[in-house]
Amino acid sequence: MSILPFEKLTIHTDLTPEQIKEKLEQFVEPYQMFRNTFKQPNKPYNGKIQETSFRITRNINYRNSFLPVIKGKIMPNDYGKGSQINITMSLHSFVIVFMTFWLFMVGGGGISLLFLMISSGKFMLEGLIPVGMFIFGCLLTIIPFKIEANIAKKFLQELW
């Protein structure tokens, strides 16, 4: 199990893959490298929509490194009517690399200090700082991701 947040979701609908794509295009604008953060976005999501897949993120007017990247794969149902959308939500790859490195370093330091305190028989309150930083880093990653993932889940389930 990973400390970093990750979610999967499958939505079944009576819509065809073409109808799903058309509905999604109503709410997703193309990704822009440089966007005016003071201007209200035209659509609630931005990203790329292809014939049978999409990669989108929510349009926000503030910085949130823990915003989920939503990847979807659209497939016709096996029984011939409707479609199935397999959705994966995860952090941006740069955030995954950075947080993995940061949590590894802080966690390793915390474990080392705990072993040092146990072996020396001395308790030092400052030795718990890396443990607190590790817990803080986990919560800082998980809570904003889960809040945004729930917003996206609700939107996507209502959309289709």
Image (cartoon, rainbow, N blue to C red):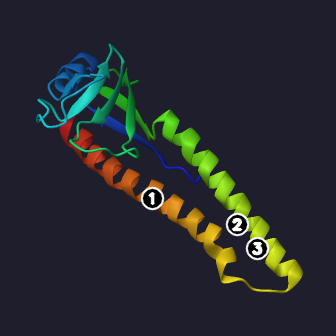
The quadrant where residue 159 appears: top left
**Residue type indicated by callout 1:** Leu
- Disc 3 to disc 2: CB gap under 8 Å: yes
Q: Is residue 9 left or right of residue 59?
A: right
Where disc 3 sits, the SS reads helix
Place of residue 136 in the rendered image (x, y in percent of width and height, measured from the top left): 51, 65
Question: Label 3: which residue?
Answer: 114
- Disc 1 to disc 3: CB gap under 8 Å: no
**Marks 1/2: CA–CA distance:** 18 Å
* N-terminal-most mark, 1 or 3: 3
**Residue type indicated by callout 3:** Leu
Q: Residue at x 33, y 20 (%)?
A: 80
Question: Label 1: which residue?
Answer: 140
Where disc 1 sits, the SS reads helix
Q: Is residue 41 visible?
A: yes
Place of residue 86 in the rendered image (x, y in percent of width and height, measured from the top left): 41, 32
Question: Label 2: which residue?
Answer: 110
Q: Is residue 54 left or right of residue 18?
A: right
Q: Residue at x 23, y 33 (%)?
A: 45
Estimate how packed mark 1 is, as few (under 14), some (14 to 19) or many (20 or more) residues with alpha carbons within 10 Å.
Answer: few
Please determine whether, in this image, residue 42 is positioned above or below residue 119: above
Give the quarter of the figure containing the C terminus: top left
Please determine whether, in this image, residue 53 is positioned above or below residue 131: above
Where disc 2 sits, the SS reads helix
